[in-house]
Image: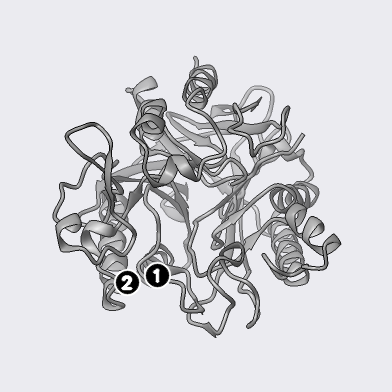
Amino acid sequence: MMRRCGIVLLIALVGSAAGAEPLRIATFQADVTPPLGAPLGFGAYGVARELVDPLSARGLVILSDEQPVVLCAVDWIGLRNGGQQAFCEALAAAAGTTTERVNVHCLHQHDAPGVDFSSEERLSAAGRGGTTCDVAASRQAIAATARALGDAVRDRPRAVTHLGIGKAKVERVASNRRIIGPDGKSKAVRWSATKNADVRAEPEGLIDPWLQLLSFWDGDTPIASVTYYATHPQSYYGKGGVSCDFPGLARGLRESALPGVAHIHFNGAGGNVTAGKYNDGNPTNRMALAERLADGMQRAWLATVKASIVAGDVDYRAEAIELPSGGRLPAGRTFDVTALRLGSAWIIHTPGELFVEYQLAAQRMRPAATVCMAAYGDLAPGYIGTAKAYDEGGYEPGNSRTTPEAEQVLLDCFRRLLRD
C-alpha cells in the first residue's frame, strides 16, 4: 500500500493518558533546490537553467503519548508513487512513527522538481533514465529533510500552551479556471497566466477566498504560523527559472515581518483554481500576487484568537481509500486520507489535485469548527474533479486518472474522518 504524506509541516504530539501534559512541537526546514540541469515539472517544463529562488521543505512535529504525527510542505510541483513513498518513509523513520502518520504535500510550483521514482525505474529500464527528475539530487533532498526533522525532534522541541486560529479574505488572487458556457459545457480555460482579456474578464467564479492560519504559542511567544490557501501557485513559468513563485515569496515576506517564527504554507484544494483572472503572465505580477497573499496572511495573523491546548486536545485519524480508476491507476491501489484535530481546528490531508468544491464541502461538514485542507499529496490520481465536471468537459477531466465516482468516495471518507 502506498502511503501519502504532506511536505512543509511536521507535527509530533506528546501527552499523558489524562491529556494534561503540554503539547510539544518541533519545527524543521531543509533546502530542496534542484541543481542546474535537473528536469522541472516531471520533465514537462524543461530543465533548471537559473536558480531564481531557493526551494524548501518545511514542517512541524507534534509529540504525545501516541506516535508522532508529521506534516510537511515542499516547494516542488509534486510527488507521485515511489517518490511520495520514499519521502514519507524517510520522515517516518526520522520521527519514529509510521507512514500513515506522515503527511507530505507539495505547493505545486511548476518551475520546480516533480519526483516519481516508480516512473524513473521504468524509464531507466528502457534507457531513458533521468527524464522526469534528477534521482540522486531528489534522494539527497529527501535525506536532508529527514535529517532536519530528526535534529528538530531531538534538539529543539518546544512546549505549546495555546493554539491560535485566524482567517482573512485574500483579494484579487484566486479565480476559477473553468469557464462554463450557457450549454453547461466548458467553453474556455483560464490558465494561470491568461493572455486573453475576454477570458480574464469572466467572473471570478467559485473559489474559497479565505486564507486560514493556525499558530502555535508558548504563552505569549509565537512558535509557528501555518497557513492554508487554495490556488494554483504559478505566475509565469516554463523558462527554466527555478522559483518558489508567489506563495513562497509571500511566505518570505511574512518571515521578514515575523522573524523567529516558523512560517509554513500549504496549498488547499486548488485543482480548478488559478490566478488567471488577475495575471496575464507579465513577470511583475509575481510580486504583486505575493504581496496580496502576504497581506491576507498578515490580516489572518492579526485576527488570531488563541485558546489553551494540551496533548489531550489532539486527535489523528487515517483511512486508506481506493479511488475509482479511469484506466491509469492500477487496480487495488490505495491512498491515505487523514484528519488531524487540534482543539477546535481540523486539517484534512488528501492526495491529488482536488477541486475547490471538496474543500468547501469538508467545511460544511463541521460548520462550527475551523476546517483546513492540504491537497497535493500523492499526485498519482491527477485531477480529482466533481462528478459534474466530467460531464462538463474541459482541461481537468482529460488529465484525471479517476472517474466521476471518486466524488462520493472522497465525501464519504471526509464524513467518517470528521465525525464526533
- Can the viewer see residue 39 in this picture? yes
Q: Which residue is mark 1?
A: 249
Q: Residue type at mark 2? A: Arg
In the visual, does 265 lie left or right of 127? Answer: left
Query: Mark 2 or mark 1, which is nearer to you?
Result: 2
For the N terminus, give its image quadrant: top right
Residue 87 placed where, x, y %?
72, 53
Which color scheme is applied? one colour
Residue 139 placed where, x, y %?
76, 65
Corner quadrant of residue 132: bottom right
Total labels: the figure holds 2
- Residue at image coords 77%, 68%: 128
Residue 53 placed where, x, y %?
49, 77
Residue 360 placed where, x, y %?
34, 31
Q: Residue furthest right?
A: 125
Q: Which residue is mark 2?
A: 286
Mark 2 Cα-neighbour bin, 10 Å: few <14, some 14–19, many ≥20: many
354 or 375: nearer the viewer: 354
- Residue at image coords 69%, 49%: 84
Q: Marks 1 and 2: in contact by CB < 8 Å? A: yes
Q: Residue type at mark 1? A: Leu
